[in-house]
Image: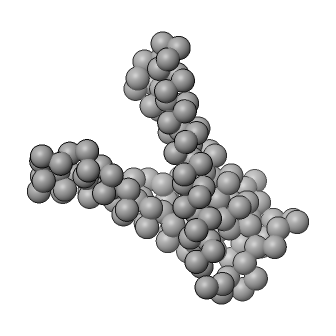
Amino acid sequence: MRKRLIRFGLVGMLNTAVGVGIIAGAIAIGVAPLVANALGFLTGLCVSFVANSRFTFGQDPRSLKRIIRYLAVFLIAYASNLVAVIALDLAFPAYETLTHVAGIVPYTVVFFILADRFVFRDSPPARGQAGDAGRADA
């Protein structure tokens, strides 16, 4: 599980870089900020799904069932982020930016656990992928 968690974190960094790059680039060419934000998040979510499928969990991303589950897990993780950010903003209004950074923690933890246990559980490895034989790595 440790190896998957590290890979999940690496994919998250890639996903963030791609998403922020899309947002910044779109705004730079005149796209409305909210539209640019949506484009960045949508692109990042797609990158995250494919990279986590292959790199983190050794699965074939071409599964409608897995895509739907991944989207559901994203929404649950995002909701956990919103709850944390709202609660922290109420408790520490002077630290609004930091509360958003802190909100990354529950989002990441919830997303990883649900992806590991619900999205990619009991799926055979993608062809040519070693996967996690028995998923018992430490």
Q: What's the residue at 38%, 56% (across, down)?
A: 104
Of the pair 87 and 122, the residue shown nearer to us: 87
Image position of 56 with respect to 95: above or below: below
> Residue 64, can we see it?
no
How many numbered discs?
0
Residue 5 horizontal side relative to residue 132, left or right: left
Image position of 45 with respect to 76: above or below: above
Residue 93 horizontal/vertical position (percent): 12, 47
Task: Identify the image quadrant of residue 128.
Answer: bottom right
Q: The N terminus appears in which quarter of the rendering?
A: bottom right
Task: Work out which residue is located at the far right of the displayed protein and give it.
Answer: 128
Residue 49 horizontal/vertical position (percent): 63, 53
Of the pair 43 and 18, the residue shown nearer to us: 18
Of the pair 133 and 99, the residue shown nearer to us: 99
Residue 14 horizontal side relative to residue 95, left or right: right
Residue 88 horizontal/vertical position (percent): 19, 56
Image position of 21 with respect to 27: above or below: below
Q: What's the residue at 66%, 65% (across, down)?
A: 56
Q: The C terminus appears in which quarter of the rendering?
A: bottom right
> Residue 17, can we see it?
yes
Image position of 136 with respect to 19: above or below: below
Task: Identify the image quadrant of residue 69.
Answer: bottom right
Residue 42 horizontal/vertical position (percent): 54, 38
Residue 37 horizontal side relative to residue 48, left or right: left
Q: What's the residue at 47%, 20% (across, down)?
A: 27
**Coloration of the structure image:** one colour
Q: What's the residue at 63%, 46% (across, down)?
A: 47
Task: Identify the image quadrant of residue 115.
Answer: bottom right
